[in-house]
Image (cartoon, rainbow, N blue to C red):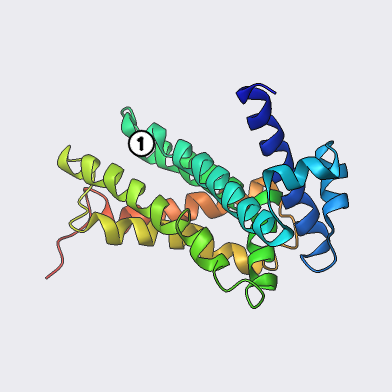
């Protein structure tokens, strides 16, 4: 088997494993189910992963990294926001909210919550590719915008935390912790409200604090 083929099979196994674990839970899932979902033979799964627990950890890690990569890509417009920073922030906020509420991201959070007692290290696995990495990247973008005079974020790290909190906090109740889909128009409303509040706190025209 070529290196490319082995990588593709590993990716298919990890994606299949996450799908099965998210659907059935760790205890109720079996390697045969995962092999069927991935479209490979059961021995192939064991050739790539030594056991079900290793497969679970690797599936969590791979999914968390994919989710993070998508969110980091969503920040790219802030590198060159054009003349209308507010509109760019609205678009970035909407994309981040949409990614936060998509099925894979919600399934990742649910799986982490339900299996944390069985896999105490799962939190660390996901945390390494979680919100703090997004906040670091966002803080860097906000710092550059501050240097350019587009914001007045004296503490870019704090500004990044507040931006993501304004986006995520309303969604837990609105989506019933990721179990209920909300309409696109509502996502845009949450995004615009978050940006409006953020700009009042960190925008270039905000009043100086005493």
Tell me which residue sits at (36%, 61%) in the image.
161
Q: Is residue 102 visible?
A: no
| 81 is higher (above) or lower (below) than 44 | above
| Count of numbered circles on the image | 1
Quadrant of image for the N terminus: top right
- Direction from residue 186 to residue 198 in the image, left or right: left
Q: Is residue 210 visible?
A: yes
On the image, the x and y values in percent for residue 95 come to 54, 42
| 204 is higher (above) or lower (below) than 180 | above
Residue at the extreme bottom of the image, as rendered: 117
Tell me which residue sits at (61%, 67%) in the image.
172
Tell me which residue sits at (83%, 37%) in the image.
40
On the image, the x and y values in percent for residue 137 come to 35, 46
Q: Decide: few, some or many residues near mark 1? Use Cα within 10 Å; few <14, some 14-19, many ≥20.
A: some
| 38 is higher (above) or lower (below) than 103 | above
- Direction from residue 56 to residue 147 in the image, left or right: left
- Direction from residue 15 to residue 84 in the image, left or right: left
As helix, strand or loop, the secondary structure at mark 1 comes to helix
Pointer 1 residue: 78
Q: Quadrant of residue 10?
A: top right
Q: Nearer the viewer, residue 106 or 87?
A: 106
Quadrant of image for the C terminus: bottom left
On the image, the x and y values in percent for residue 116 come to 62, 73
On the image, the x and y values in percent for residue 19 come to 77, 50
Q: Nearer the viewer, residue 77 or 57?
A: 57
């Amino acid at each position: 088997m070529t290196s490319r083929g082995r990588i593709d099979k590993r990716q298919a196994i990890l994606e299949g494993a996450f799908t099965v674990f998210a659907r059935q839970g760790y205890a109720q899932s079996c390697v045969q189910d995962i092999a069927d979902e991935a479209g490979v033979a059961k021995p192939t799964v064991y050739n790539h992963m030594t056991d079900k627990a290793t497969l679970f950890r690797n599936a969590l890690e791979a999914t968390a990294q994919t989710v993070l990569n998508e969110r980091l890509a969503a920040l790219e417009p802030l590198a060159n926001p054009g003349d209308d920073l507010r509109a760019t922030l609205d678009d970035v906020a909407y994309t981040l909210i949409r990614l936060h509420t998509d099925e894979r991201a919600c399934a990742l959070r649910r799986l982490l919550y339900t299996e944390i007692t069985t896999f105490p290290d799962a939190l660390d696995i996901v945390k390494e590719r979680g919100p703090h990495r997004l906040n670091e990247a966002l803080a860097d973008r906000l710092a550059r915008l501050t240097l350019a005079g587009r914001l007045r974020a004296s503490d870019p790290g704090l500004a990044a935390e507040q931006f993501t909190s304004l986006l995520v906090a309303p969604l837990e109740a609105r989506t019933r912790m990721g179990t209920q889909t909300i309409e696109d128009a509502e996502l845009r409303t949450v995004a615009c409200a978050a940006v409006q509040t953020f700009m009042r706190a960190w925008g270039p025209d905000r009043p100086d604090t005493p």
